[in-house]
Image: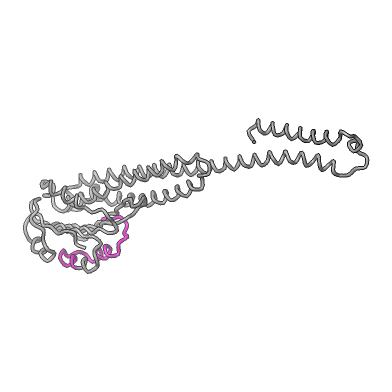
Amino acid sequence: MLINCVAYQDGNKLADIQVEEISDYLQQPNCFVWVAMKDASPEELQQMQQEFHLHELAVEDANHGHQRAKIEEYGDCLFAVVPTAEMVDGKLQVGELDVFVGRNYILSVRTRSKHGFLGVRARCEQEPHQLRKGSAFVLYALMDAVVDRYFPVVEALETQLDKIEGDIFNPGQQRNNIQQLYALKREVVMLKHIVAPLMEAVGRLYGGRVPNLCESTRDYFRDVGDHLYRINALTDAIRDTIATAIQVNLSMVSIEENEVNKRLAAWAAIFAVATAFFGLWGMNFKYMPELDWKFGYPVAIAMVTGVCGYLYYRFRKSGWL
């Protein structure tokens, strides 16, 4: 679906144009066309391929989607895959932004993402001196917007982790905590798999041999790289904290099980003593002094009760009961 198609010249907006007019504006000096699409169909991408003469392999990747973050060069053109991340109903949702960049055009195709980039266009139009740098600056603005949206995701993951940590020492919550921690760990790993390849891809735009299109904006892409390094560090910290929380939670489970085992062992010892006494007296020996003594039965009961009471006192004092 076409969102907008705008022509710019010398950093200023010329007009909203139709797709059929793109080739006419591409021939004008100091002019470039910025097209934004959402969930583009193969037919729409084919139309754009004809207008911008896009490489068929890049178009095929955009059609298939679910690509790893990357930046590829096709002659004088760039094809960038920038994964998007956003929290939807408390769950991490991963989308994709495919960007085709040429000397006098930029085409962005957004898929599986609810948040658009109209604010990016407005920001660029308010800075005509920056927009005069052409399509490379638009590529930076789009990538910067995507990366900046990673920070709220990191904050949401940290908030979930803090909530789980607050329940770690609550009895009876261990199983639920483990489930939540592993679910959170999966989301952190998903974010890590987004950030790490994107760091490598963005590094190609400011370090080493930089594509000619991005030569004038390499410092801007370095800023994007710095943000990615920060997010990567935060993600690693969250993952380490989750691992620690899982170990603490498992330790709490072991401690609780040990407490239960100690209580069971203490009661088993108390009943074992009573069983031993009554088992001995219940063997029906013919000659036992207790049998002919009228106080034998009360004394026997008192003895068993006393011994069991003493064991209970000792176990209670030692913390087993």
Query: Which residue is situated farthest in the front direction here?
Result: 294
Q: Is residue 303 left or right of residue 28?
A: right
* Nearer the observer, 40 or 51: 40
Location of residue 219 in the rendering, given as x and y in whole percent from the top left corner: 20, 44
Q: Residue at x 39, y 44 (%)?
A: 160
- Front residue of 71/280: it is 280
The x, y position of residue 16, in whole percent, is: 11, 58
* Residue 264 drawn at (x, y percent): 66, 42
In the picture shown, does residue 4 fall above or below 290? below
Number of numbered labels in the structure image: 0
Q: Residue furthest right?
A: 287
Query: Residue 65 in the image: x percent, y percent?
Result: 30, 62
Residue at 8% x, 63% y is 24
Is residue 315 shown left or right of residue 235? right
Q: How is the image coloured?
A: one colour
If the image is split into quadrants, where does the C terminus sit?
top right
Quadrant housing residue 310 = top right
In the image, residue 270 sits, relative to residue 191, either above or below, namely above
Of residues 14 and 234, the one drawn nearer to the viewer in this rendering = 14
Which quarter of the figure has residue 157?
A: top left
Considering every residue shown, the one lying at the far left of the view is: 29
Image vertical order of residue 5 relative to residue 248, above or below? below
Q: Identify the residue at horizontal 69%, vertical 40% (top origin).
A: 267
Residue 231 drawn in magenta: no
Q: Is residue 49 magenta?
A: yes
- Specify the segment rendered in magenta: 47-72
Q: Quadrant of the N terminus?
A: bottom left
